[in-house]
Amino acid sequence: MRGTIFNYTLFFVAALFLLSGCSPVSAAEATEFGEFSAEDFAYESKCRQCHAIIYSDWEGTMHFNAYLDPFYLEEVKVASNDTDGLVDEFCSRCHTPIGVVSGEIPPIDGSEMSDISKLGVQCDFCHVVSGSNGTGNAPFIVSPGDTKWGPFDDSRSTYHDSEYLELYTQAEYCGMCHQVIHPVNGLVIDDTYSTWKDSHYGEENVVCQDCHMTEGITEFEANPGRAGSGAPKRDHISSHDIVGGNAFIPPMFGADNIAEMAVERLQKAATLEISAPEIAKTGEEITIKANITNSGAGHYIPTGVSEIRQIWLEVHVTDRGGKEIYSAGALDENMNIVSAKMIYNNVLGDSEGNVTLSFWLADRVLEDNRIAPEETVTEEHTFTLPEDVEYPLSVETSLNYRSAPQDLIDHLLGEETQVPVISMNEVSSTIYDPATPPEERSEESTPGFGIVPATMAIILMMYVFKRK
Ligand code: HEC
Ligand code: HEC
Ligand code: HEC
Ligand code: HEC
Ligand code: HEC
């Protein structure tokens, strides 16, 4: 074990050496570790005085939580241990950027951190970004102080100077952090930016901000208003409730509103279609076919730490008496997914080819089962109808999303923390006895949840965070 860490260390040092010498962009151009002190940055409470709406949008989001997120804090401890502290600065650069540029991390235990560094990805970090050296692994340049950079070229404030920077309106801004590359072996761990770039959204320049910082979820929708008190009315100001699919962490910080928005977003991300026979005889082999399309996301679903996220189809076929005839993708008593046809995520392997969720130890992709933008994947469920069924049969399917496998969270945060399972879409249909005349078969296919807001309440009831 010791040997592995030692080799890892050597590799890491060698790789850093090579990177700093050979890469066209030298690391010195990006903001360096410890270049500033925490006092150079302003507290978000200062910004809130004039930007109250933007503040309340941001509060409780995953950017607000980026450091205090208990899932992150536990994982970074493990990662730090596994690598003898070599990843401390690397991980922290995105999760507490002020902590890194002010030299308060390492130590990774947070003992040297000031309060402001714990506020994750915040106002006076994002708006003092004065440039970048491309995308991936946080190559930001920051210039804390009187000037706030942003999307307007005519902005005035009594408190600060304003400077326009086109980067704020581009996907490359987000791509600084939403593209993670293993610092030693170059394996791309998070490819949200590059998969966006290669998609039709990238080609048409539908940027991250269009879907994540406007009223629209799958396209730009203007949000007219004022960006601050005393500011002029504008046709569009950006929403700062930047949400993805995470409905797990925000409620831990009291932000149920953010979780609700994440559920709504997940329900616009994919469509589900199923085809099942309308009639079937006992003893007959039945096939249910499901088509799942990534219809709304500008990148793969899932994306980000997609080796940890899980999307899968749950299928239940029951007869009139409620007897289960077929099931796939249900959860067992330990909340493990049982016999799903596919878990749509990617599977990373360590240097020995063993599956790992510890992406800092990964050096290869064993399988990539995510769904690309606009791609449709198909799965088939086949079973034989037993002799003793009571017709009609109901077929119920749900496309589910979970931020992490329950057993990983049990291990890191304890068994009382339950990861919510969110239904992205549901479709059902009915299979009749061939003897039933067609006029007595009521067509019962239901559309997905995404377009039936009344069902939202039911899904939100699934938010049981404490398993009792
Ligand atoms: C993850 C980085 C990020 C964080 C955190 C963030 N902003 Fe922004 N902000 C942006 C980007 C990017 C834009 C421009 C979006 C566009 O125009 O497409 C923006 C735009 C703005 C604008 C211009 C008006 C508007 O809404 O378009 C103001 C003012 C602003 N932010 C203030 C704040 C304040 C105050 C906070 C903290 C409560 C904050 N921002 C947090 C990235 C961030
Ligand atoms: C005294 C009130 C006040 C305070 C305090 C304040 N702002 Fe502003 N800010 C404004 C006004 C007014 C505007 C102009 C908005 C417009 O042009 O529509 C503005 C504009 C901005 C812009 C847009 C700049 C551009 O060119 O696109 C950003 C970014 C911004 N503020 C960030 C911040 C941050 C970060 C803080 C906290 C460190 C902060 N502001 C504190 C009043 C304030
Ligand atoms: C300084 C680095 C940084 C920048 C810049 C940044 N992000 Fe993030 N973002 C993060 C981190 C770190 C997290 C995750 C925090 C966590 O999970 O604990 C995150 C989380 C998110 C999430 C929530 C994901 C989920 O699972 O729900 C979305 C959506 C998101 N960012 C979009 C954006 C967009 C859009 C931009 C550009 C306007 C952007 N981010 C800019 C670092 C950044
Ligand atoms: C066409 C609209 C669209 C565009 C463009 C888009 N997104 Fe998303 N994004 C979504 C939807 C819908 C979801 C919810 C599905 C999901 O969570 O995978 C999402 C989810 C996410 C998540 C959470 C991922 C997960 O699976 O948990 C992150 C992080 C994110 N987006 C970041 C970005 C970044 C960064 C960009 C730009 C490089 C971007 N998005 C561009 C629509 C978009
Ligand atoms: C280049 C920026 C970057 C680096 C470096 C980085 N992360 Fe992240 N991390 C992110 C972003 C962005 C997300 C959100 C992705 C999403 O939700 O889809 C994230 C999400 C996570 C999550 C999921 C949190 C949740 O609540 O779902 C964990 C855990 C995590 N990171 C741990 C780490 C560890 C440990 C390291 C170092 C080995 C690390 N990260 C390095 C940007 C980064």
Image: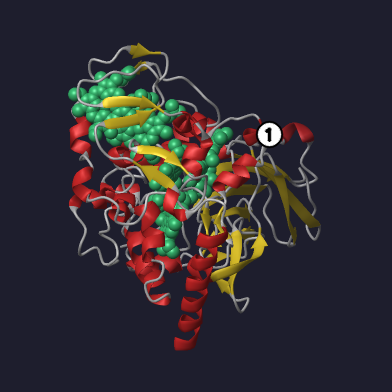
Please say whether residue 289 is visible from this viewpoint.
Answer: yes
Quadrant location, the C terminus? bottom left
Where is residue 56 shown, x and y percent of the image? 27, 33
Where is residue 118 shown, x and y percent of the image? 25, 52
Q: Is residue 440 left or right of residue 396?
A: right
Where is residue 220 shown, x and y percent of the image? 52, 25
Q: Is residue 191 left or right of residue 290?
A: left
In this rendered view, identify the residue nearer to me: 175 or 413: 175
Image coloring type: secondary structure
Q: Does any atom of ligand 4 lie closer than 8 Å to the CB of label 1?
A: no
In this rendered view, identify the residue nearer to me: 6 or 394: 6
Q: Considering the numbered disc 1 on the image, is that residue within a helix, a strand or a loop?
A: loop
Q: Is residue 247 left or right of residue 397?
A: left
In this rendered view, identify the residue nearer to me: 229 or 74: 229
For image coordinates 47% across by 31% down, the residue present is 453
Where is residue 387 shown, x and y percent of the image? 75, 62
Q: Residue 312 is drawn in which quadrant?
A: bottom right
Q: Is residue 58 above or below residue 53?
A: below
Q: Residue furthest front?
A: 21
Q: Residue 348 is drawn in which quadrant?
A: bottom right
Please say whether residue 271 is visible from this viewpoint.
Answer: no
Count of numbered labels shown in the rendering: 1
Residue indicated by mark 1 = 442
In this rendered view, identify the residue nearer to me: 16 or 360: 16
Callout 1 amino acid: Ser
Q: Is residue 160 above or below residue 462?
A: above
For image coordinates 39% across by 44% down, the residue present is 141
Label 1 neighbour load within 10 Å: few <14, some 14-19, many 20+: few
